[in-house]
Image (spheres, helix red, strand yellow):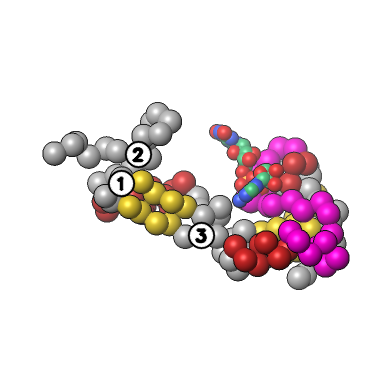
């Protein structure tokens, strides 16, 4: 836990949480949510802080999910499962070696022709 100030991309919004939580995995995240004494409300995730409004702001606990960066490609099912911190370009780079890419329509992840 540390104290910090988080600013959005153009410094128009500041978040000054009492506590910053950086859980290492899902179990630690669950503990953060449950432990209201050490992680006061409101709990708000901060992503890349590119929002134009105060949706990420917290006077309680700012959660950073930077450790949720796993990418699992399933070439049999032609699907990809990603953590909450994964960026779209990382998804692109993980899929490319398999001849896959994210779909242009909802639910599509297939670019290889069916054989
Ligand atoms: C210069 C600029 C150009 C933009 N262009 C586009 C565009 O072309 N198309 C478009 O759609 N948008 C665009 N946006 C808007 C931007 O994509 C959104 O504001 C987006 O929410 C920013 O994501 P972020 O990770 O920075 O979120 P943050 O600003 O950090 O947070 C936004 C919200 O999402 C929540 N949140 C963030 N990460 C997580 C997470 N991992 N899990 C759960 N909740 C989370 C936060 O609590 C908050 O409520 C642009 C913004 C800027 C500044």
Residue beneath disc 3:
69
Q: Are marks 2 and 3 in contact (CB under 8 Å)?
A: no
Disc 1: residue Cβ within 8 A of ligand 1's nearest atom: no
Instruction: Identify which residue is drawn at 74% across, 51% down.
Output: 44
Q: Position of residue 80 (x, y in %)?
A: 39, 49
Asked if 54 appears above or below 26 in the picture, the reply is above
Name the dominant secondary structure of the magenta segment.
loop
Q: Position of residue 78 (x, y in %)?
A: 31, 45
Quadrant in which residue 20 is drawn = bottom right
Q: Position of residue 113 (x, y in %)?
A: 19, 36
User: Ligand 1 is found in which quarter of the picture?
Assistant: top right
Quadrant in which residue 101 is drawn = top left
Per the image, is 3 magenta? Answer: no
Quadrant for the C terminus in the image: top left
Q: Nearer the viewer, mark 3 or mark 1?
A: 1
Residue 65 appears left or right of 70: right
Instruction: Identify which residue is drawn at 56% across, 52% down.
Output: 84
In the image, the segment drawn in magenta is 33-53
How far, Cα to Cα, is label 2 from label 1? 9 Å
Residue 91 appears left or right of 2: left
Residue beneath disc 2:
109
Secondary structure beneath dot 2 equals loop
Q: Position of residue 17 (x, y in %)?
A: 82, 58
Quadrant for the N terminus in the image: bottom right
Q: Earlier in the sequence, mark 3 or mark 1?
A: 3
Per the image, is 45 magenta? Answer: yes
Secondary structure beneath dot 3 equals loop
How far, Cα to Cα, is label 3 from label 1? 21 Å
- Crowding at dot 1, Cα within 10 Å, few <14 / some 14-19 / many 20+, comes out as few
Instruction: Identify which residue is drawn at 68% across, 41% down.
Output: 51
Residue beneath disc 1:
77
């Amino acid at each position: 836990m540390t104290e910090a100030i988080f600013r959005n991309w153009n410094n128009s919004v500041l978040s000054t949480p009492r506590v910053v939580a950086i859980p290492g995995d899902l179990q630690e995240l669950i503990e953060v949510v449950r432990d209201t004494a050490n992680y006061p409300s409101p709990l708000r995730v901060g992503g890349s802080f590119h929002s134009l409004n105060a949706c990420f702001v917290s006077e309680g606990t700012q959660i950073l999910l930077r450790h949720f960066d796993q990418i699992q490609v399933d070439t049999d099912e032609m699907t990809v499962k990603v953590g909450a911190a994964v960026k779209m370009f990382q998804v692109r780079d993980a899929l490319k070696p398999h001849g896959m890419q994210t779909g242009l329509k909802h639910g599509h992840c297939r670019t290889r022709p069916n054989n």
